[in-house]
Amino acid sequence: MPSTLSLSAGPLSLVLGLPDRGMPEILAFGRGAAAPAFWPDVPRSSRINGMDVDVPSAVLLPVTGLGAFGWPAISGHRDGRDFLLDFSGWAVRRDGKITVLTASDAVAGIDIEISILTSEAGVFGLSTRLSSVKDGVYTLDRCMAGSFLLPAGDATATRFTGMWGREFQIRRHPFAPGITLQESRRGRTSHDRQPYLGVAVGAARFAFHLGWSGNHLVAVDTLDDGRRLVHLGALFEPGEIRLSRSDSYQSPVVYAAEDAAALQAFVRSEVLSWPDGKMPPRPVTLNTWEGNYFDHRLDSLKAQADAAAALGIERFVLDDGWFGRRDDDTTSLGDWIVDRRKYPDGLKPLVDHVTSLGMQFGIWFEPEMVNEESDLYRAHPDWALKVEGRPFLRSRHQQVLDLTRSEVADYLFDKIAAVLSTLAISYIKWDMNRDLTHVGGADGRAVTTAQTRATHALMARVRAAFPHVEIESCASGGGRTDYGALANTQRVWTSDCTDALDRLEIQRGASLFLPPEIMGAHVSANPSHQSGRTLSLTFRALVAMAYHLGVELNPLDMTAAERTELAGYIALHKRLRPLLYAPGANFNLDPRDGRYVWGAMTSDHAAVFVAQGPTMIAEQPEPLVLRLPGAPEQMWRIAAAHGDCPTGFIRMSDGQMKLLSGELTFSAASLASAGLPLPMQRPETALLLELRPAP
Ligand code: GLA
C-alpha cells in the first residue's frame, strides 16, 4: 500500500510518498512542507503524449527507461543487461536520527537502502546503498547520494570557482533551462569545483554539500513542470564500481540545509569530533612553512619557538622539510624518517623545547604521496597508482600511493605511528599536494573512489590510535575541504594564499559552509609570498583574527615594534575567541563596494570586523546594518574600536567620531534598520568594532 513519510530537520521538512513500485516521490521539501491528503490518487504526470500510467518525475534518485525522462541519479548494468531498475516493496525503519528506506528490484538483483539523517541543526543528510543480490557483476555507472526538490520559478545558484590560492570564489548565476552539471575529476575535493550548491528561489533558500573528498557530480535537472531536482554524489570512472553478489556500494552523504548558519551548526554538533567530546580553545598557531620552507635549522627553529611563545602563540607546527633528504620538493615523500642532517638527535630536542615553552607541537605529513626519488619508491615502485602503458604523470614531482592496498596503508600508519608514539606531538598537518591522474589499482582498474575512502580510513585509523592528536586537512591549501574529510579532522588550511586582501574573498566563501574556528587564517610576511603585495600588520591581523588564528612567518624577521603589535592582536584574539566561536553568534555579510563585514554577536557583546579591500567606488559606504540578538529597544554603543581607526577613514565628521568613540548610543532596532553611518574607509584597511549594551 502506498504511504507517505514526513521527516523534519529543524525548520525544514521532507515529505515522501512511498509507492507500490518506483522511486519514492518527493511530495514536498522545505519550510512547512506537508503531505497532500490526496496522494497518490491524483496523478502528477498527466502529460499529453505521456505514458498511460502515472510516472512522477519529482522522485528521490530517479532512474530512467520506464517512463521517466529526467536525468538518472542511478544507473548501471550487468554487461549491458539489467539496465532498467524498478524497485518495489518499500519499507521504513527508524534508527535514532536516521530513517532508512529499503526496497528491492528482484529482476536486476539489486537492493537499495536510502538513509535519511535528520539533524536538529536544520540539516538533512541523505546517503544511498546499493547491493547486488544476484550472480554476475553489476557495473554501477552512477549512484547519487540523494536528491532534493526545489520549487519552480526563477532561481539563482551560488557556486564556487577558484584555483590554487583562490579557493571558494563565490559565483552566482541564474539556472539555464534543462540540466546544470558540475563534474569534478581531480581526485580531491578540489580548488575549483567544490561539491557545494546554494539556491535561492523566491523567498526560499537552500544550501547543499556533499561530504566527499573525491570526484563528484552536482546535477540540477529542470522537470517538465519547472520544478528542479538537485542531485549530488560521487563521480565514477568507467568500470570503477563493480558489484559481485553480496557486494555493496555505499555513497557518501549529501547534506541539505537552508543556509550557512545551519550548516555551520551542524558541522559543530555532528561532523567534528574532539578528543574529549568538546572543542578546546583553538590554539594560536605558528606554522613554519613560509618562514623557513625546506631550510630547517634547529637553532633558528628553537629561537623562532621562543619568539612565538613570547608573542602568545600556543601551537608550533613544523611544516614540510623534516624527513628523508627533503631540501626541495623533488625528493623524499614516503620516507617518513627524520633527516639526521638537519636534526642530528632527532626531533626530540625541538619538540621538548617547544613543549617546555608551553606550546603544543604539530608536524606535517603528506601520507598519500611518494617521490620517485625516495627509498620507498625504490623499494616499492609498484605501490604507486599507475596504468600500464600510459604516461606516469608527475605533479609537484610526486606520485600517489595506492592506499587501497593494505600493505601500503599499513606502512603509512606505522610510519605516522612511529613519530606520534615517540614524541609529544598533538597535531598533524595532513597534506595532499596533487590531483589524482592515472588512478589504476593493482588489477589495472580505476580506484579513485576506493582511494578516497582509503584515505579517510587511514585518517580514522590514526585518530583512533592517537585520539589526542588533532588533524588539519590541507591539500595545497583548501583542496580537501568537505564534511567527509572533516569527520576525521578538526581544521582546514583554507588556502595557501595568505595575502590578507585575497583572503577576504576566500574566507567569506568558505564561511558559506564552515564555522570560523576550523578555518586556518595566518598572518604572513610583507611582501606577500603569493601576491607580492604589502599590507599593514593591522590589516593582516584583523583579516585573520575571527578564524583559527595563526602566524606564517619567521618571527625573528620582525622588528620589536611589529612583535609588540602582533602580540597585542594575539591577546585581543584570545580575549574575543569565546565570542567569535560562540554557537550561532558568527555572521558574514555579502561584500558590497569592496567592503567586507563579518564577526560575531551575542546579546551582550559584538565584534564587528569591517575591512575595505579595493578602493571604494561610491563616495559613501552604505550604513552598517546589523541585527543584534536581544531586545530591539536595547541601547548599544561602540565600546572599543581597534585597528585602522580613525586613521583608515577618509574625512570623518565630529558626529562620526563621537559614534566611534562610544559617546553616542543607538538601539538594536535602529542598527537593524537605519544602521550606522560609518565614514568612507581607505583601501586595504580594517577595523574591529566592539559593541556593548549601553549602561
Ligand atoms: C602545501 C601546503 C603548504 C605547505 C606545503 C609544504 O602547499 O598547502 O601549506 O605545507 O605544501 O610543501
Image (cartoon, grey):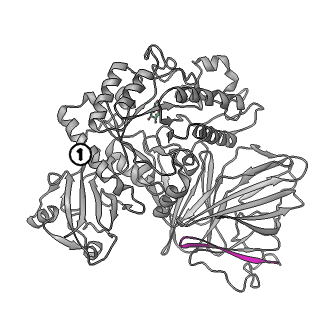
Q: Is residue 579 magenta?
A: no
User: Which image quadrant is residue 388 in?
Assistant: top right
Q: Left of 328 or right of it: where is 403?
A: right
The percent coordinates of residue 604 (x first, y second) are 29, 66
Can residue 619 be seen here? Answer: no
Q: Left of 488 or right of it: where is 570?
A: left
Can residue 23 be seen here? Answer: yes
User: Vertically, is 237 above or below 49?
Assistant: above
Q: Secondary structure at mark 1?
A: helix
The percent coordinates of residue 315 (x first, y second) are 39, 37
Point 50% across, 44% down: residue: 191
The percent coordinates of residue 93 (x first, y second) are 75, 66
User: Which image quadrant is residue 664 in?
Assistant: bottom left
User: Vertically, is 177 above or below 242?
Assistant: below
Q: Left of 331 or right of it: where is 315?
A: left
Point 40% across, 26% down: residue: 352
Three-letter code, disc 1: Thr
User: Which image quadrant is residue 226 in?
Assistant: bottom right
* Image quadrant where one finds the C terminus: bottom left
Q: State the residue position of label 1.
A: 538
- In this rendering, the count of numbered labels is 1
Q: Which residues are magenta?
A: 1-13
